[in-house]
Image: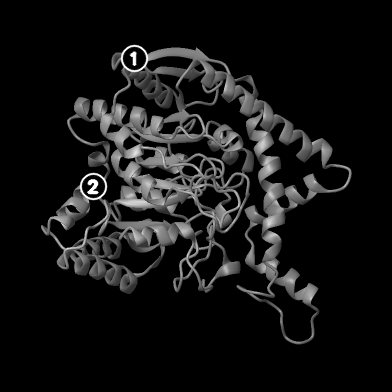
Amino acid sequence: MSELIKKTAAETAAAVAAGEVSAVEVAQAHLDRIAAVDEKVNAFLHVDTEGALAAARAVDAKRAAGEELGPLAGVPLALKDVFTTRGVPTTAGSKILEGWIPPYDATLTRRLKDAGIVILGKTNMDEFAMGSSTENSAYGPTGNPWDLTRIPGGSGGGSAAALAAYEAPLAIGTDTGGSIRQPGAVTGTVGVKPTYGTVSRYGLIAFSSSLDQGGPCARTVLDAALLHEAIAGHDPLDSTSIDAPVRPMVEAARRADVKGLRVGVVKEFGGEGYQAGVMQRFHESVELLRSLGAEVVEVSCPSFSYALPAYYLIAPSEASSNLARFDAMRYGLRVGDDGSRSAEEVTALTREAGFGAEVKRRIMLGTYALSSGYYDAYYGSAQKVRTLITRDFERAFGDVDVLVSPTTPTTAFPIGERADDPMAMYLADLCTIPSNLAGNSAMSVPVGLAPEDNLPVGLQIIAPALADERLYLVGAAVEAALNDKWGHPLLEEAPAL
């Protein structure tokens, strides 16, 4: 591997700013890496070679002119294919949007470009972000670089796999029920779900509007903090955007101190169904936090037990409404338009051909839950549970500064193992869903390998809404302590492709 692709984003940005290497050289090194390994990984759906090199040349031109560069200028990034990107195919992992070229950038995409970040291309994902394994992509599954026969998590498996395969030092994902954190956990990378409303959703192709949240993915906590600050901030184009100052995430990541911090261990996240090696690494992480000066207490959040069924009523209900726009009339796929069929028939044929099985399943679930006679019993009851979960968080954060749990109950499972068992697949999001329902912030940080299969394990750190910097304070402290223990970053252990 080229030494350039092994650098952290912070190191790369510093080298570009100092003129030690050009942004074009950095971009080309990562494009070469993608060309060499992505046939095996399938992390990218589209590689924008010309666009990436043009963006890199623009950064080099600014540096040559003596202009001040941003903290991530010249650093390559892999963008989940659910954010609109002007002039670049955007599919959301679905055949129904195959070949669609957006005429505008999502706010997040624009902010990346404004920061001088070089977008390499669009990454693979579960169709419309519906899944926990990236097996629901219409363009084939992504492999986990630790073991290509296993899943890289979902729905943002392409972004996480690109990091673990050294195809990019930074990536963007979206988290509706854990789709940033869960892929981070099973690929040994860092994934962050920001507080809902602090990163713009304008231009994010919607799955579940009250849950979807874009966020940073990286190989180190500091890199994630730098990216988080680049994409965060109020956006008048997004009606759910919070008008609040961006939190000091980079400062917290650099401080990396948990002395005196109160850490709550969530009682409900453990026991039957949790892999022994995952729990072993989790308990070791809790003891590590204690040794670093944190005060650890057990916290009970009883409503968390109902989060999974509540989520799988709320999210499909919102999806059934959001996906109604894909009607074959305005953009994307159109099937059966031979002049002999009505608009309704064309729409039905297009949806039959364009939507995959999991998307159809969730549309049907959501339509049923919202139907007359069932609304109060299902959707209405799920929203009441959502309120109870939010109250559990509020009580917990009255006693502690952050909560911790395993990110996922197991390590990466084999591709195909749960494909025919939706309930088993949904259980992968057991620990991550409560934070989406409540809207607060959460992170997954790697804490080693499970002894029984030598696959990565993630520690989930949960902070209150608008206190995202606490994630970085704790995550960076854990990362630094474990790197000292091992003498190297976790990803140095990843199998070569």
Structural crowding at the residue carrying mark 2, measured as other residues with C-alpha within 10 Å and reported as few (<14), some (14–19) or many (≥20): some
Q: Can residue 143 be seen in the rendering of this structure? A: no
Identify the disc placed on residue 290.
1
The amino acid beneath tag 2 is Ala
Q: Can residue 183 be seen in the rendering of this structure? A: yes
**Residue beneath label 2, please?**
10
Residue 207, x across and y down, in percent: 61, 53
Number of callouts in the render? 2
Residue 16, x across and y down, in percent: 17, 57
Image-quadrant location for residue 472: top left
Q: Residue at x 42, y 45 (%)?
A: 150
Taking depth in this image into account, of 4 and 108 the one nearest to the observer is: 108
Q: CA distance from mark 2 to mark 1?
A: 29 Å
Identify the disc placed on residue 102.
none
Residue 114, x across and y down, in percent: 36, 61
Judged from the image, the secondary structure of the residue bearing numbered disc 2 is helix
